[in-house]
Image: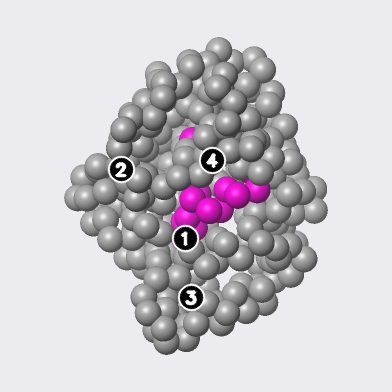
């Protein structure tokens, strides 16, 4: 079992919202920093928490999302990595195992390459490697190609929480995966007052961040500079549960040729969301976490500082 609490961390422009799941055991020897995707929140990791009750897990609401939605730009991976450093310092974790899903993979890679002394390992989950541009799409058009459906959702309002739950229950990615953890995640995402509730993510932040998900600009060279393996877990189905994966096998072969340290794990029968938001999907991540924890030296986390919870 683990206890859950929310914290707020001073960062540029205000406070970053985050959560910590602390095991009841007193001999915990590692911290996992779990970084969510482009329009998600820290509650995207509830299945990971359930599967790792003896591991300390720290998860942010990235700048422009969830409880951090009012933090100002500019956004982008370097800024998110800087925010992650502030979070790791705030919880007094000397080093962390970094796990990132979707855009959170890019934040994880940027954090690990910018502050390599603070990362014991890197796990990228269906994200964190530059995405192929869809045919006929230029980099200028990339935000619409990548986040068109998400942008539509962020512009919507909902009269009550049940209406938003229905919206997500009807989403093709979650047709067979709905449960209490998903409902908690969906409920947390809404802000405002009835009957004008709306998703918490800033469309401006999401749009700006999406521009950094396809181009390389030295990012792969920096990943190559890491002195440890990079684990990549791939979903065979896409954002809408379609057969076309976000990372087709041919694309992964390309990245394996460029990144000798890359270890690719195909996760069967999941899509881009359920690879982390279902018990079956998260099992593969848990397996890799256990593998890394068994082979990596860790620092013992110090007790929480006496700071006010959010």
Earlier sequence position, callout 1 versus callout 4:
4
Q: What stretch is highlighted in magenta?
A: 33-48
Q: How far apart are marks 3 and 4 (CA)?
A: 32 Å
Residue position for label 4: 3
Does dot 1 land on a helix, a strand or a loop? loop
Q: Which of marks 3 and 4 is in front?
A: 4
Q: Nearer the viewer, residue 40 or 272?
A: 40
Does dot 4 land on a helix, a strand or a loop? strand
Residue position for label 2: 308
Residue position for label 3: 153
Please tell me how many numbered marks the rendered image carries.
4
Q: Do the residues labelled 1 and 4 touch (CB within 8 Å)?
A: no
Residue position for label 1: 39
Q: Which residue is drawn at 48% across and 26% down?
A: 96
Instruction: Relative to 74, say whether 170 is above or below.
Output: below
Q: How far apart are marks 4 and 2 (CA)?
A: 16 Å
Q: Nearer the viewer, residue 184 or 288?
A: 184
Q: Distance between the residues labelled 1 and 3?
A: 10 Å
Instruction: Relative to 153, say whether 24 is above or below.
Output: above
* Residue 196 position in % (x across, y down): 39, 84
């Amino acid at each position: 079992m683990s206890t859950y609490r929310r914290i707020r961390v001073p960062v540029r422009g205000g406070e970053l919202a985050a959560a910590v799941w602390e095991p009841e055991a007193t001999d915990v020897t590692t911290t996992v920093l779990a970084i969510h995707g482009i329009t998600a929140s820290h509650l995207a990791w509830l299945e990971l928490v359930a599967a790792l009750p003896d591991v300390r897990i720290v998860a942010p609401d990235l700048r422009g999302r969830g409880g951090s939605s009012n933090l100002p730009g500019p956004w982008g991976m370097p800024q998110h990595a800087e925010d992650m450093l502030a979070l790791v310092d705030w919880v007094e974790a000397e080093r962390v195992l970094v796990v990132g899903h979707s855009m959170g993979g890019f934040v994880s890679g940027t954090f690990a390459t910018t502050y390599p002394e603070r990362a014991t390992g890197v796990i990228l989950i269906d994200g964190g490697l530059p995405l192929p541009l869809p045919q006929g799409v230029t980099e200028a058009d990339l935000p619409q190609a990548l986040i068109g459906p998400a942008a539509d959702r962020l512009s919507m309002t909902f009269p009550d929480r049940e209406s938003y739950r229905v919206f997500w229950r009807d989403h093709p990615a979650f047709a067979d995966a709905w449960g209490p953890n998903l409902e908690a995640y969906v409920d947390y995402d809404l802000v405002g007052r009835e009957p004008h509730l709306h998703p918490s993510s800033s469309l401006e932040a999401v749009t700006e961040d999406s521009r950094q998900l396809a181009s390389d600009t030295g990012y792969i060279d920096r990943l190559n500079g890491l002195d440890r393996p990079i684990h990549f877990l791939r979903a065979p189905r896409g954002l809408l549960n379609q057969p076309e994966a976000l990372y087709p096998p041919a694309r992964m072969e390309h990245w394996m040729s460029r990144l000798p340290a890359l270890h690719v794990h195909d996760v069967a029968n999941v899509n881009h969301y359920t690879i982390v938001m279902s018990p079956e999907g998260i099992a593969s991540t848990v397996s890799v976490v256990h593998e890394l924890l068994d082979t990596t030296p860790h620092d013992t986390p110090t007790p929480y500082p006496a700071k006010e919870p959010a």
